[in-house]
Image (cartoon, rainbow, N blue to C red):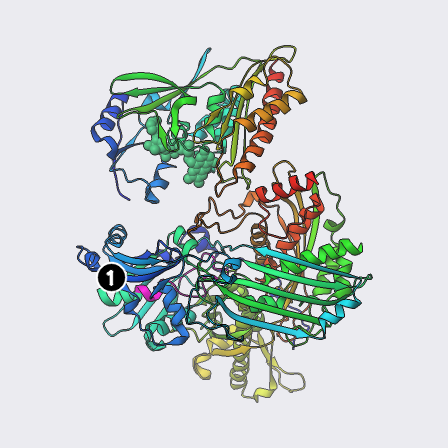
């Protein structure tokens, strides 16, 4: 469907429509709103990682002057199995499953008073042994988080911490390994990490006398907050209105709810609007990080570098409740490569850590660390250039994915070739430096989107969608509308609207907004173009078939015999009232065919052999983006994803003590890279149009976090001869290996 | 987080306020430690006694024998003094590491010392340069060597009503040099895993005639590593001397295992960093000859 056409706006870099508000500080984020009569909510959180709740006594807190409401899990209905886990994560019932698990909430006339009132709540716990690693969770005799739960898609072996199992297979991998000249069998490990969005979760919620709930919050999806809040509270979706604020980062972590249903309850009880804002510490302890993983991998190849078979078993941490992205990981691990015999098995494992949420390409960075580390080793073993090895096995149009479907046009080969042609690949290296490369794959998502385009009386346009703008999507929406209507992009006003203004739209996530919501904007704009032709036909008193639309003008089609000067959008807009009334375009779709995106990353590191410190000295990220609507924001996504992946590789990890308390719930000791830690990341855009999208767009935002973990580890290997199969490659861990290697 | 705010103009007023309110009051310089601790619930003073209006705490005097740095001088203001930077490049290096540009506008060396974090960056450099702390209290003044100022994480020799007025550093001779290095896993905005301050003097032949080595973040307080200093004395700063000082520093370090690094790792890095710091200090001393 993708069209070969000359674009006027697509591919340009207009200033973002929300830019002035953002740089002047005028933009309103989650914690910025205040309402008259508003009070403050605070959560009491579990001091234990694993305990049975024997009793909760809130009477002393309720008696404090200025405390207007106290709630616990008993204030929530407990009858909808679909949201039982979500509800129990929001307010613990029966058991607390991680340190920091919310257990009660107080609303008071000041934040400080609410905080103090929490101390007046008495909770009696029966403390249980916490389960703090995959190994401990799977050990026989391990404490079980939920005795009643039985794993999905698996034989019932009694109580277990395995929540689900998935499997993908093709061919006969075990016998196929016999045809391989080299078989590598390795184990890899990654730790729990956090998205590290700068803006903590925050909301203001007002429950009105008629039961209607109004929510203002920072979220990746107002509609998701609406449906999740309504379900958890057991009320109709139409009772909840959500207005998303500007958002200071989400990366998948703001696709669920933590505060909103609690604030709604507090507001219902107190009759006041209630504001809740997490501290940074709460964000680390009790929002949704990405789980650690263990991956056992075996790959066999022939001497000339053809993979013949691969098997993978993987376990991913889900946190206190089921729901790790292990299935996505299982679907990703072999997807960049084309070979016949494979077996993949994944396990979703619960343990006493915060419940994980989505994080940029959920599941893919962990498994790609494994496969791309192994591919690097294979290239060394076979003495084949790592790009050549990947090219020899690269997935392309027609390749069947491990989970069934076949690829349409994809850009794996194109990104590899662009990497080889890039000056980075041949640049000389200095002392203690090494170069690594890795590829990455992500499905991308389509899902549901709506768009409304309203033509104004002077022929400018307002684009209304429900997707919070995280990565510059307002600008992309405006560009696509301008492109279709042939008007200046500055004349388009893109608006992110509340759930009662915009049509239903899924979250800003899955790299889907420019693809799916953008597609809806294109369709809605085309409806306006069609309507403009109808109006022109009225003005000219001719058949609509005699009118065409091109570059912002209605004009007689060739051979129509009509002789009229073209009418611009503005010309027709001025005559709207006379020709039939307002002109609006509306479109909705469940977008299928989100083109998967491949990337190839090149990374140079310099290692201090005496301290184990790794500095990334050069980084190039090459990605097939289908079509870059606004290249600056595409580059921004690529750079941001690479930066997060580098952090994941080098220093980021949740550090728990023996009791399961997070020891580094702040940016001082949760070491994300700061700007000076990174070189300028060279983002290289490759465009292999997605055949299903009108402009060829693919999702962009998630793929760039997929390759860096292995790219960094492979570079460290090249610099030091030490292969790190366990992340992070923090200085103490690397030094231990370096000194160990020196001893041998 | 709420507290009263007093702005005394003299040392006497300040000590009187501190004595009157006892533990309920806290001296307040830049507040870059204190405000963070208050927000985090670690401290909740009722009264903040701002020290920045007291002239003596804001003075900076470079005398012929002694350099006097007011305890509340912002690290940014120290950095702007070219003479100070020339005389004590290592101390200034350490002071400059504290926080970001924004933090630098407020943070003070006095606050860094009084906060008594084992990882405070300026403290090893102060100790290496044999700084002396001028302390004022209800009973008058006293001097405390910087090496003895902190008595453990978060605690100091300051008694009730006492405050730190200034730091007095002997003016380095032209053939002396100092340096400070810290190790952090990132490039900035981090806390020292190990910090090393060195000051040494080389005579015309390159023989080391005086040296002091101080280690940060590898013990409950800064470690005045006298054995490391001795390892440098009486000879040139050659490979053997560097090896000796590195080993001595490793021995002197008393780190613990924590989330910021294992004890073994910190000991190792203390040795590496000491060698590197000595090399820089020696180069600076040699340039002065
Ligand atoms: C983002 C950030 C980054 C940082 N980075 C670093 C770093 O890299 N290295 C580092 O060492 N530190 C760092 N710090 C900590 C802090 O900035 C330093 O310790 C700074 O030097 C403290 O100085 P201050 O004037 O702000 O102290 P304040 O916060 O005002 O005071 C600190 C403590 O000392 C007491 N005090 C202050 N002055 C006196 C006095 N004259 N007499 C008696 N008691 C006094 C106060 O009561 C308080 O207990 C950082 C802090 C932040 C917020």
Q: Could you tell me how many numbered marks the image carries?
A: 1
Nearer to the camera, A485 or B281: B281
Quarter of the image for residue B51 reads top left
**Where residue A170 appears, x then y in whole percent?**
69, 75
In the rendered image of this protein, does residue B217 appear above or below residue A42?
Answer: above
In the displayed structure image, the side of residue A437 where residue A642 appears, left or right: left
**Where residue A554 appears, x then y in whole percent?**
58, 78
Residue where numbered disc 1 is placed: A70
In the rendered image of this protein, does residue A690 appear above or below residue A259?
Answer: below
Magenta segment's dominant SS is: loop
Residue at 67% of width from left, 60% of height from top?
Answer: A371
What subunit carries mark 1? A
Nearer to the camera, A551 or B85: B85
In the displayed structure image, the side of residue A198 where residue A70 appears, left or right: left
Please say whether residue A247 is one of the residues in the magenta stretch: yes
In the rendered image of this protein, does residue A535 appear above or below residue A468?
Answer: below
**Where residue B45 appears, x then y in whole percent?**
27, 37
Q: Which residues are magenta?
A: A245-263
Residue A628 in view (yes/no): yes
Q: Residue furthest bottom?
A: A543
In the displayed structure image, the side of residue A426 where residue A643 appears, left or right: left
Nearer to the camera, A740 or A7: A740
In the rendered image of this protein, does residue A238 appear above or below residue B72?
Answer: below
Quarter of the image for residue A708 reads bottom right
């Amino acid at each position: 469907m993708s069209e070969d056409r000359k674009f006027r706006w697509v591919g340009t870099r207009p200033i973002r429509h929300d830019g002035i508000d953002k740089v002047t500080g005028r933009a309103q984020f989650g914690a910025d709103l205040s309402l008259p009569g508003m009070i403050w909510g605070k959560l009491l959180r579990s001091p234990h990682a694993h305990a049975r709740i024997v009793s909760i006594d809130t009477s002393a807190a309720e008696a404090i002057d200025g405390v207007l409401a106290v709630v616990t899990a008993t204030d929530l209905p407990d009858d909808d199995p679909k949201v039982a886990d979500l509800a129990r994560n929001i307010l613990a019932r029966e058991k607390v499953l991680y340190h920091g698990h919310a257990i009660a909430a107080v609303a008071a006339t000041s934040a400080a008073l609410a905080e103090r009132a929490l101390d007046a709540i008495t909770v009696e716990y029966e403390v249980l042994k916490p389960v703090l690693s995959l190994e401990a969770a799977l050990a026989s005799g391990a404490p079980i988080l939920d005795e009643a739960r039985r794993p999905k898609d698996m034989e019932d072996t009694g109580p277990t911490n395995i929540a689900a199992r998935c499997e993908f297979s093709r061919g006969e991998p075990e016998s196929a390994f016999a045809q391989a000249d080299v078989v590598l069998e390795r184990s890899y490990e990654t730790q729990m990490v956090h998205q590290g969005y700068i803006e903590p979760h925050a909301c203001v919620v007002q429950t009105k006398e008629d039961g209607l709930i109004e929510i203002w919050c920072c979220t990746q999806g107002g509609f998701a907050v609406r449906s999740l809040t309504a379900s958890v509270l057991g009320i109709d979706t139409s009772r909840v209105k959500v207005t998303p604020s500007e958002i200071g980062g989400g990366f998948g972590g703001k696709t669920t709810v933590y505060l909103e249903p609690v604030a709604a309850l507090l507001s219902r009880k107190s009759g006041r609007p209630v504001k809740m804002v997490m501290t940074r510490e709460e964000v680390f302890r009790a929002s949704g990080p990405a789980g650690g993983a263990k991956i056992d991998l075996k790959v066999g190849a022939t001497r000339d570098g053809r993979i013949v078979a691969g098997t993978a078993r993987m376990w991913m941490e889900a946190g206190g409740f089921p729901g790790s992205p292990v299935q996505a990981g299982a679907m990703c691990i072999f997807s960049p490569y084309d070979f016949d015999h494979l077996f993949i098995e994944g396990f979703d494992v619960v343990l006493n850590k915060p419940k994980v949420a989505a994080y940029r390409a959920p599941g893919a960075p962990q498994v790609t660390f494994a496969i791309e580390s192994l591919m690097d080793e294979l290239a060394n073993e076979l003495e084949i250039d790592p790009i050549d090895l990947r090219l020899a096995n690269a997935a392309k149009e027609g390749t069947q994915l491990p989970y069934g479907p076949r690829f349409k046009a994809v850009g794996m080969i194109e990104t590899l070739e662009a990497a080889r042609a890039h000056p980075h690949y041949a640049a000389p290296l200095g002392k203690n430096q090494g170069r690594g490369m890795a590829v990455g794959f992500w499905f991308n998502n389509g899902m549901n989107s709506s768009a409304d385009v309203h033509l104004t009386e002077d022929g400018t346009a307002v684009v209304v969608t429900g997707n919070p703008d995280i990565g510059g999507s307002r600008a992309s929406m405006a560009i696509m509308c301008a492109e279709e209507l042939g008007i200046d992009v500055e004349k388009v006003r893109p608006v992110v609207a509340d759930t009662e203004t915009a049509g239903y739209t899924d979250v800003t996530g899955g790299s889907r907004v420019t693809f799916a919501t953008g597609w809806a904007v294109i369709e809605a704009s085309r409806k306006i173009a069609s309507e403009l032709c109808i109006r022109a036909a009225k003005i000219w008193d001719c058949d609509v078939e005699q009118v065409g639309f091109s570059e912002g003008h209605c004009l007689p089609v060739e051979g129509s015999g009509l002789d009229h000067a073209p009418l611009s959008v503005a010309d027709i807009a001025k005559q709207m009232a006379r020709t039939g009334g307002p002109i609006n375009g509306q479109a909705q779709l469940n977008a299928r065919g989100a083109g998967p995106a491949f990337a190839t990353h090149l990374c140079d590191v310099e290692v201090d052999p005496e301290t184990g410190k790794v500095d990334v000295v050069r980084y190039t990220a090459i990605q097939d983006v289908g079509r870059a609507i606004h290249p600056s924001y595409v580059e921004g996504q690529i750079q941001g994803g690479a930066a997060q992946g580098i952090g994941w590789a080098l220093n980021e990890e949740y550090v728990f003590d023996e009791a399961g308390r997070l020891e580094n719930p702040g940016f001082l000791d949760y070491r994300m890279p700061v700007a000076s830690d990174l070189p300028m990341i060279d983002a290289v855009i490759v465009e292999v149009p997605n055949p299903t999208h009108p402009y060829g767009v693919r999702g962009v935002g998630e793929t760039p976090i997929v390759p860096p973990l292995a790219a960094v580890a492979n570079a460290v290997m090249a610099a030091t001869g030490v292969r790190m199969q366990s992340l992070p490659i923090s200085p103490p861990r690397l030094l231990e290996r370096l000194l160990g290697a020196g001893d041998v | 987080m709420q507290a009263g705010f007093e702005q005394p103009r003299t040392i006497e007023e300040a000590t009187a306020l501190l004595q009157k309110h006892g533990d309920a009051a806290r001296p307040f310089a830049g507040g870059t430690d204190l405000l963070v601790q208050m927000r985090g619930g670690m401290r909740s003073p009722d009264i903040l006694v701002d020290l920045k209006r007291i002239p003596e705490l804001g003075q900076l005097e470079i005398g012929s024998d002694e350099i006097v740095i007011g305890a509340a001088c912002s690290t940014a203001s120290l950095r702007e003094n070219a003479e100070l930077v020339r005389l004590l490049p290592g101390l200034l290096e350490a002071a400059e590491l504290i926080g970001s540009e924004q933090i630098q506008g407020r943070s003070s060396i006095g606050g860094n010392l009084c906060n008594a974090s084992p990882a405070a960056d300026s403290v090893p450099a102060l100790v290496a340069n044999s700084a002396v702390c001028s302390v004022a209290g209800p009973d008058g003044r006293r001097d405390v060597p910087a090496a003895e100022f902190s008595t453990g994480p978060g605690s100091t020799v300051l008694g009730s009503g006492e405050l730190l007025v200034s730091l007095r550093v002997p003016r380095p001779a032209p053939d002396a040099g100092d340096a400070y290095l810290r190790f952090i896993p990132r490039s900035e905005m981090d806390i020292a895993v190990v910090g090393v301050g060195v000051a040494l003097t080389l005579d015309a032949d390159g023989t080391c005639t005086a040296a002091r080595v101080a280690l940060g973040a590898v013990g409950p307080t800064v470690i005045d590593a006298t054995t490391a200093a001795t390892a440098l004395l009486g000879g040139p700063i050659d490979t053997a001397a560097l090896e000796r000082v590195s080993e001595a520093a490793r021995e002197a370090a008393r780190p613990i295992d924590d989330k910021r690094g294992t004890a073994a790792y910190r000991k190792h890095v203390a040795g590496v960093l000491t060698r590197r710091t000595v090399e820089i200090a020696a180069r600076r001393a040699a340039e002065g000859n």
